[in-house]
Image (tube, rainbow, N blue to C red):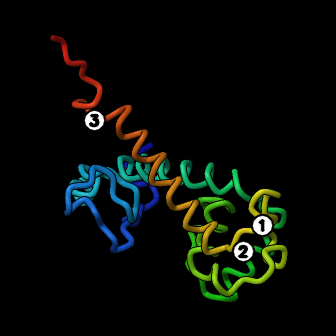
Amino acid sequence: MPTNLLKTVKTPCIGVCSTGIGDAVCRGCKRYAHEVINWNSYNQQQKQLIDGRLTDFLSQIVASKLTVVDAEKLRWHLDTQNIPYVAHKGSYTWAYELLRAGASQIDCVDDYGLQLDAQYRGQSLVALRLAIDNEFFILSQAHYERYFDVASTQQVTV
């Protein structure tokens, strides 16, 4: 596909960058330090690959904690409350955006077209959002260590 036909990918940066203090994976957007540094030099295809990885990781984690039972109801609430979301990323990323924007103000997730898995029903939504964010970071860090961190994969021979 020609690069000029690819969708423009906005930076995933949320303004909480930890790569400047030495983290290999940003605690804010979950990109790797080299991706943060080189973002503006990447073409749209490269940006889409990174964005796709982040979307897949986040969706996988959210789906392990809740089910989107009515995506249109969720979308309606996001639109009505002016909560930004990216339509093509799917309903599990939308659910995360809802939690990120208003976890402390939501009384019943069923009203939003969501259903918490049984083990999370007694947990506050703020704690759930923090758990999702933490797992997202851990998954990103594990992926980085496995595929990009050459130092951690080299074995020391004596």
User: Is mark 1 in CB contact (under 8 Å) with mark 2?
Assistant: yes
In-image side of 79 versus 67 (left or right): left
Q: Which residue is mark 1?
A: 71
Q: How far is disc 1 from disc 2 in space, using C-alphas?
A: 6 Å
Q: Position of residue 128 (x, y in %)?
A: 63, 66
Identified at 64% across, 83% down, the residue is 104
Q: Earlier in the sequence, mark 2 or mark 3?
A: 2
Describe the element under mark 1 as helix, strand or loop.
Answer: helix
Q: Secondary structure at mark 2?
A: helix
Residue 30: x and y, percent? 40, 56
Q: Where, by quadrant of the figure, is residue 87 drawn?
A: bottom right
- The amino acid type, in three-letter code, at marker 1 is Ala
Name the residue nearer the viewer: 95 or 27.
Answer: 27
In front here: 113 or 157? 157
Asked if disc 1 and disc 3 are in contact, CB closer than 8 Å, the reply is no
Q: Which residue is mark 3?
A: 149
Q: Which mark is residue 54?
A: none
Residue topped by disc 2: 75
> Gap in Å between the C-alphas at discs 2 and 3?
38 Å
